């Protein structure tokens, strides 16, 4: 149901709520500072619009009917929301609270996002941040995450994206590993090198071949779909890995393989549902991430 098609009179709903909380029309009229006949008319009109009976008289008081019991919690929540709205509108509440889920690859989740979380937590302690580390695309339309860090511009019409960074991928290895394969100086020297794979290595192999690296399926002696694990295998001197230069900044013990390399550009996009425009909590985290990527060290 489209909420914009619903006709709703908050004054009548408030009259119902206060009457339910006070237990009688006279007490509710005093609480609302109105005369009892006016209050009674609002409650009766509310019942007529809903087509149900909300109260039954018990002695000198009123008790909620089963229908009234079903509705009162919803109206109470509306009342609390109205109070929060009023306080925020008058500048009495500035804090942002609630959960914001951020989806990113395991490598980005491990090596980049934690530093960015520090400023967000300090700025808004009421925001609960949940990092969804996954190498598959989270479905933002199904709310698997609120914000996603992706490497491609979104094409879905109900998603919005902002490009926040562009870096290059290069080949990296430990000095000891490179020494063990004869200190390669040309692409041809990598013919006998071991490469650390990433799950299904078909696309990776095609990419390496496309930039002139003589790799074959036999070149991948170790593979893992988890990018963080793959990178740790490189750090242990078990082969050559390919990764973005910004993540490589975290590991000074690794060096770029000293052969002529064609850089592979990688873009970072922050992606969110179009709800971003109206959700203050998600917009706050989104904007802070934009700032964080802008300040993140450049390779």
Image: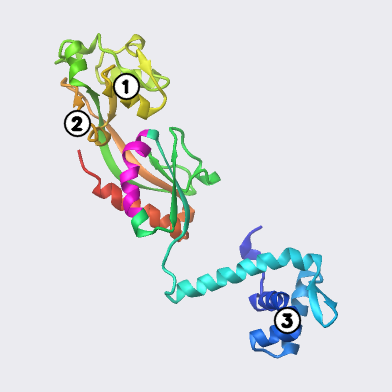
The alpha-carbon separation of the residues under discs 2 and 1 comes to: 15 Å
Q: Residue at x 25, y 12 (%)?
A: 193
> What residue is disc 1 on?
233
Q: Does label 2 or label 1 sit earlier along the sequence?
A: 1
Is 124 left or right of 21, judged from the image as shown? left
How is the protein colored in the picture?
rainbow
Q: Tell which of 217 and 31 is nearer to you.
A: 31
Nearest to the observer: residue 21 or residue 182: 21
Q: Can the viewer see residue 151 in this picture?
A: no
* Residue 25 visible at all: yes
Q: Which mark is residue 252?
A: 2
- Indicate the secondary structure of the residue bearing disc 1: helix
Residue at image location 69% in from the left, 74% down from the top: 17
Image coordinates of residue 117 in percent, x first then y, are: 35, 49
Question: Mark 3 or 1 closer to N-term?
Answer: 3
Residue at (76, 73) in percent of width and height: 49
Are the residues tagged 2 and 3 within 8 Å (C-beta)?
A: no
Q: What range is drawn magenta here?
A: 107-120
Report the mark closest to the observer, 3 or 1. 1
Question: Is residue 58 in the magenta section?
Answer: no
Report x, y in % for residue 274: 47, 53
Query: Residue 42 — which label?
Result: 3
User: Residue 106: where, in percent of width, then height?
Assistant: 39, 34
Give me the C-alpha separation between circle 2 and circle 3.
Answer: 72 Å
Check the image and report above or below for 203 versus 271.
above
* Dominant secondary structure of the residues highlighted in magenta in the image: helix
Spatial distance from mark 3 to mark 1, Cα to Cα?
A: 71 Å
Helix, strand or loop for disc 3: helix
Residue at the image position 78 percent from the left and 79 percent from the top: 44
Q: Earlier in the sequence, mark 2 or mark 3?
A: 3
Q: Secondary structure at mark 2?
A: loop
Is residue 113 within the magenta segment? yes
């Amino acid at each position: 149901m489209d909420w914009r098609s619903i006709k709703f009179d908050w004054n009548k709903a408030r009259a119902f709520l206060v009457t339910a909380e006070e237990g009688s029309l006279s007490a509710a009229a005093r609480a609302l500072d109105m005369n009892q006949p006016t209050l009674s008319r609002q409650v009766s009109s509310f019942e007529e619009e809903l087509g149900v009976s909300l109260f039954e008289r018990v002695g000198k008081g009123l008790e909620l009917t089963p229908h009234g019991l079903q509705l009162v919690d919803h109206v109470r929540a509306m009342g609390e929301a109205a109070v929060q709205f009023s306080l925020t509108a008058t500048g009495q509440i500035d804090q942002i609270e609630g959960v914001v889920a951020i989806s990113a690859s395991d490598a980005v989740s491990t090596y980049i996002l934690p530093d960015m979380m520090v400023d967000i937590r300090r700025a808004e302690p009421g925001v609960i941040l949940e990092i969804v580390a996954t190498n598959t695309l989270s479905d933002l339309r199904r709310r698997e995450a609120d914000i996603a860090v992706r490497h491609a511009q979104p094409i879905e019409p109900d998603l919005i994206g902002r490009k926040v960074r562009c870096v290059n991928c290069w080949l990296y290895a430990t000095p000891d590993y490179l020494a063990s394969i004869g200190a390669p100086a040309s692409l041809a020297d990598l013919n006998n090198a071991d490469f650390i794979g990433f799950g299904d290595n078909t696309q990776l192999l095609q990419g390496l071949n496309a930039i002139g690296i003589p790799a074959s399926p036999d070149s991948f002696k170790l593979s893992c779909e988890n990018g963080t694990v793959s990178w740790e295998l490189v750090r242990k001197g078990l082969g050559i890995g390919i990764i973005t230069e910004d993540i490589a900044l975290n590991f000074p013990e690794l060096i770029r393989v000293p052969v002529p390399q064609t850089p592979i550009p990688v873009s970072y996009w922050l992606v969110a549902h179009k709800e971003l425009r109206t959700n203050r909590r998600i917009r706050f985290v989104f904007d802070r991430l934009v700032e964080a990527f802008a300040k993140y060290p450049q390779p």
